[in-house]
Structure formats: C-alpha cells, structure tokens
Image: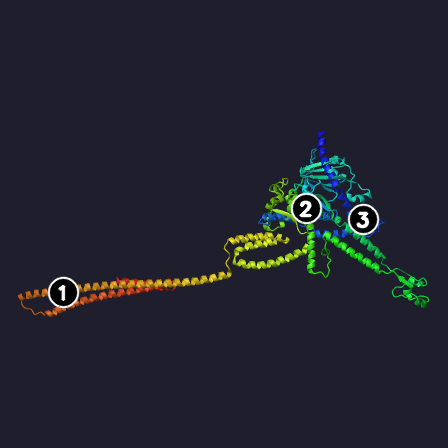
Amino acid sequence: MAKEKQITEPVNYYDGLIVAYERKFQPWESRADKILTRYRDEGRSKQDSDTKFNILWSNVNTLVPATFSKLPQPDVARRFRDQDPVGRVASLILERALGFEIEHYPDYRATMKEGVLDRFLPGRGTAWARYEPHFKAQAAQLPEDGLQVSEDQDEPDEQIDYECAPTDYVNWKDFGHNVARTWEEVFVVWRIVYMHEEGVEERFGKKIASTLSYDATPEDKKKELAQQETKKQARIYEIWDKQKKRVFWMSRSKKQMLDERDDPLGLQDFFPCPRPLYATMTNDSLVPVPDFALYQDQARELDTIADRIDGLVKMLQVKGCYDASTPELARLFTEGVNGTLIPVKNFAAFAERKGLQGSMDLVDLKPIYEAIKVCFESAREIINFIYQITGISDIVRGQTEASETLGAQQLKVNFVGLRLGDMKRDVARFATDLLQLKAQIMCHHYSPQTIMAMAAVEQLAPADQQLIPQAMALLLGQERMTNPDALSPNPLRAFRIEVNADSLIELDDRAEKEDAKEFLGGLSKFLETAGQIGMVAPQMIPMMVEIIKWATTKFKVGKNLEGTLDQAIEQLKVAAQQPPPPNPEVMKVQEDAKVEAQKIQSADQQQQREMGMKDQQHQREMQMKDVQHQREMKLKETQGIRDTDADMKKHEMTTSAKKSIESEKAAASSKPVVQIDAQKAMESVANDLVQMAKQNQQAHQQQTQALIQVMEQMKQAVEMMAKVMMSPREHTVSARDQSGKISKSISRLM
C-alpha cells in the first residue's frame, strides 16, 4: 500500500501542474486556433460570400523570411579569441561536426522553420533535443569446429552503427510548463508524445503497453482523422523536473507513471528544450500575445473595406434603358462589336428623336468609381497603420517610390532595423540554443571516433592534426578518450569555446559583402603602412599581425585563416628574438666598406712592415757601422800597437846595434882597425825594419778589406732577407747564393 502511494504521489503532483497550465493557457489556445483558421482562410460556409483581405498571411510571409531565410550554420570559436591553438582546433572540430549534423539530417531545418512560423502565428515556437543511437548486431565469434549450441547462450552483442542528436518540433499545444511569470522561474517542462502500441511496447515493455488506452490523436489531425478510420495512439507526457534532476514518463488517462530516470543527457541547464520563441510578452506572465491580436481590429476594418470594394466593383458595369420602339438597340452591346453597324428601321424618325442620345439612357459610373477610389485610399491607410504596428515598412516589401530620396529610404531601413532587430535576435538566440544543445549531446554521448569521422579531421592542416588529441580531450574529457562510458565534462563549462549561430538574415548578405570590400580595402592600406613600419621597426610586426587577426576573425571565412595567422605570429615572435637578417643593400655597403677597410688595413700593415723593415735595416746598418767602426778602431789600435812595437823593436835594435857597434868599436880599438861604413850599416838595418813594417801593414790592410767585404755581403744579405719576407718566392735563390758567399768570405777571413 505504501509503495502504491509512493508511485501515485508523483502522478498526482505532475497532473496538478498540467491542470493548472491548461487552465491558465486555455484562452490563449482558443485565440491561437482562430488565428490559424484565419491564416488558412478556413471556416467559411457556402453562404458566406463576404470578401476578406488576408493581411495576416501577407505579414507572416513577409516577417518569416525577414527573420529566417536560410539554414543557420554553427559558429564555434574560442571564447576570448586569445592565443589558444588547442581551443581553436577543438572549436574547428566541433563546428565541422555540427555542420555535418545539421546538413545531413533534415530535422534542424524543419524545426527552425516550424518554430519561427509558430512564433508569428500562435505566438510561441518550441523545440526538443534528444540523443538517438542506432545499433547493429555484432558478428558472433564462432568456434573453428562449427556453431556451438548451448541453452544459456546470450543474444548477439550490439555495437553502435551511427549516432545522431535530432531536434524535434513540438506543436504549441503539445508543450507545457509550470505556471510562472518568467522563463527563469520554470522548473518543470513537458511535451506530449503520441505513440502507437508497437512503439509503447518497444519503449516501455509489453506489460505497460497492454494497460494503456489508445484513444488520442494529435490536435492538428483531429479533423482529418474524423473523416477516416485510423488507428489511434496513446498520449504520453514526457516530464523533465529541474529541481529533482529526473525525467518521468506518465499517462494521464491511466494515472500511471510509466518510467523515470536520472538526468539522461547531462545538459548544462538540464532542460532538453531552449527558451521558446515568444511573441509579445510581459514580465508577469508567460502567456504570449499573438501579433495578430494587436492589429485584429484594423484587419477587420480592412476586411470590411475589401468587401465594399468587391461590391462596388461588381456594380461597376454598363447598365441603362432604351426606347422600346427601337428594339434594335438591345443588340447594340451584344452584336455591335468590332465596328459592326446595327440597322435601324425608320432611321429618319430615329434621328428626329436625337438618335442614341434620345433613345437610350445609361447609369452614371463616375460616382461608383469615386467610391471605389475612396475605398482604396482607406485600405492603404489601414495597411499603413498595420505596418506601423508590426514594424513592416515599404523597403522590406521592396516597394519604394521613384520620388523618394536616398535619405528617406535609409530612414525606412533604419526603421525596419529598429522594429525587426529584436525579432531577428530572438530567432538567432533560439537557433544558438538548439545548436548548443546539439553540441552538448554530441560531446557527452558521441564516441570520439564518431566526432572525428563527422569532422573529417584527416583533412585538417598538418599543424592542426598534431593538436587533435588535445582538442578531443578538451571536448570530451581525458577519461572518455580511453573509456567511452565515462562521464564527459560539458565543453561549454570549460569556458574556452562557445557555440553560436551565424547570420540568419538574407538581407545581411549584401551588408557582409560591403563590409568585406571595405575590409579588404582597409587591409591593403594597412599592409602598405605596416610594411613601411616593419622596415623601420621589425619588433612591431607581431603586433600588426595581431591587429590583422583581430579584424579577420570578425568574418566567417577568417576562421580558416586563424591557424595560419597564429603560426605566423609564433614565427614572428621567434624571429623577433633573433637578430634581424641584414638588408642586402646594407650588406653590400658593409661588404664594400669591409673590403676598403681591409685594403686600408693591408696598406697600413704594408707601410708598417716597410717602416719596420726600414727601421730594422737602419738599425742593422747602424750596428754594422758600429761594428765596423769598432773593428777599425781595434785595427787602428792594433796597428798603433804594432807600430809602437816596431818602433820599440827598431829602437831596441838601433840601441842594440849601437851597443854592438860601440862594443865592436871597443874591440876594434884593441884590434887592428877595420874600416866599416857605419852609416850604411844603419841604413841597411833601418830599411830592413821598414820593410818588415810594410809587410805587416799590408797584411793588416788585407784583413781589413776582407772584413769590410764581409760586412758589405752581410748588408746585402739583410736586404735580400727583407725582400724575401715581402715576396719569398722571387728572392729565395738569391738569398741562398748570398748566404754561400758570406760563408766563403768568413772562411777566407779566418
């Protein structure tokens, strides 16, 4: 009993929320039904012949393409546009996967189109996101000896064939939430799902399928189903409770809870649906006010005028009466065509009655024409009132007058931007929310192989392919890269990437092209200026490339250039740390200056060598002169000593001779006198001495001359050695010959 009470309590709780919602939104649903009937021009009886002007259809088919004209494309980028190559590659992978998802499957396009249409008709467009894996049976591993039969054999394993994250359109009558003033106060949302018995059995089991009542049909098909016998369906409520973080499936007809689960998708805001597309709203209620309700009175007046115009146009025909005495006049407007004349009997009497003027009188059509003209003027005024209410101007419809100036047309464009800007932003927000739901489901549930296959990562640039593992870890989490069943962090909570929808408005394409032209023109001028600055200050080049990157990322095509720009910036930063390469002209000037400096240095060195050699030669000459002078002095001293010795010897010999003469004289005195010529004897002795001195002097002079010759040869050898140092190849042999001569002279001198 306690268990049954526990099961029925959630049923009663959520049933109470649904009842409160139906009570609150019932007037809006009734009004929306009438608006749809008016839009489709239904509900007319055969007796109702009133003419109507369907301004609602005209306005809706103008506003829908003005706010949603093409399929929105995902725009995934780094949140802060900083230097984050891993975040950039992760954004690129997720954007390519989302692009494949929305282009390959038609659900996103249909959901967006139907949601926008509901926004402009009943006043609320809703959608629902879900995860849908498709499995296929895995081939069983059979033993080599054949199929093994066993009673406890399990069913064949299943593996994922493909995965998708469809977005379902939810009819405005099949969506609900707890009664609240704003969307932020909503904590429970639900949608009604109509399922056949086979679907219920597959989803909830055969036991539950047998207990449900299949007596419901979608509201928009009741009239069609009433005319034919069709198998009905069960109405099942799918309820998402944000406070409990649980999902319930309930049948109100049986007051039965079919299933309940914990958060199955792991979305950031829990709800699998974005904030609906609302029409006019106030802060005290989530009941929308359809746009048509704001100008329904003017639309009714326009219908009245249209009906009046229809009546006046029907009256605008030739009518009158004629004289019965001339029955031929009745054939005037039936047979009198293409210049055919009708004969009249007694034409003279007919002419006396002033012919046709006297025999026929027609209804005056001018008052009818004037009335029709006034009606059209009134209709135009009412249409202008409606355009002011809805925010539609003539420029949106492509209707301009030739007399209008460019300024007047620009004012109309600005007026349209002010009025329709909020609608465009709301549609863009709705598309972005759906894309974010898809992205979260893909990152939380898709296998890494599925995402990489959808993004075709093998076609990325080689530099980006190196960052794929890190980028996938950022999107799916490091654990899910190895274990697909592990929990994945929400990529939107990583605060590094953001998911948006690109431009949805076809009218913005022209502005984008103009912006692109302006950007390219400004870029060319910037590059010209930047080139001049870069030549003067190369350290400014990275900053200028950053400016180009900032401007480029404002355009959709700029995403493909971000990687190249990032790589260029890194290369420039590395190059900035290294010395800049020399300018060829500067290098040429430097080389010329270096050659000139080498020439000057060589000339200086040559001059210094010559001066040094001259100094050395001068020193050697001085040394040789000193040596020669010393030798001469020594020779003179030796000669003087020798002369002195000779004189002394001469004196001694003279003295000795004198003594011997005196002794001989003394002996002679004692002996018989012998006549000796003393003078001749003295002269003979002196001559002998002189001859001996001359011979000694000649020998000394020969030695002196040999020494002088050796000194001269040494001088020539020194000069030859200096020449050899300057050009050794030319004077090596001469130096050797001179050296040989010096050696021979020295040997002779010795």
Question: Could you say which disc has been placed on residue 651 in the image?
Answer: 1
Q: Quadrant of residue 244?
A: top right
Q: Which residue is mark 3?
A: 42
Location of the N terminus (image quadrant): top right
For the residues carrying marks 1 and 2, which lies nearer the camera in this image?
2
Mark linked to residue 434: 2
Circles 1 and 3, Cβ within 8 Å, touching? The answer is no
Q: The C terminus appears in which quarter of the rendering?
A: bottom left
- Camera-near label (3 vs 2) is 3
Q: Is residue 439 above or below residue 369?
A: above
**Foreground residue among 651 and 230:** 230
Which badge, 1 or 2, is on the more N-terminal residue? 2
Q: Which badge, 3 or 2, is on the more N-terminal residue?
A: 3
| SS for dot 2 | helix
Q: Is residue 543 above or below residue 12?
A: below
How many numbered circles does the render carry? 3
Where residue 396 sits, quadrant-wise, is bottom right
Which element is circle 1 on? helix
Which residue of the protein is positioned furthest toward the top in this rendering? 1
Q: CA distance from mark 1 to mark 2?
A: 148 Å
Q: Is residue 307 left or right of residue 112?
A: right
Tell which of 46 and 216 is nearer to you: 46
Q: Residues within 10 Å of mark 3 (few under 14, many from 20)?
A: few
Residue 656 x/y as whole percent = 11, 64
Q: Position of residue 253 (x, y in %)?
A: 76, 36
Distance, label 3 to label 2, CA atoms, is 33 Å
Residue 140 placement: quadrant: top right
Q: Amino acid at mark 3?
A: Glu
What's the residue type where badge 1 is placed? His
Position of residue 416 measured from the top left corner of the image (x, y, whole percent): 70, 54
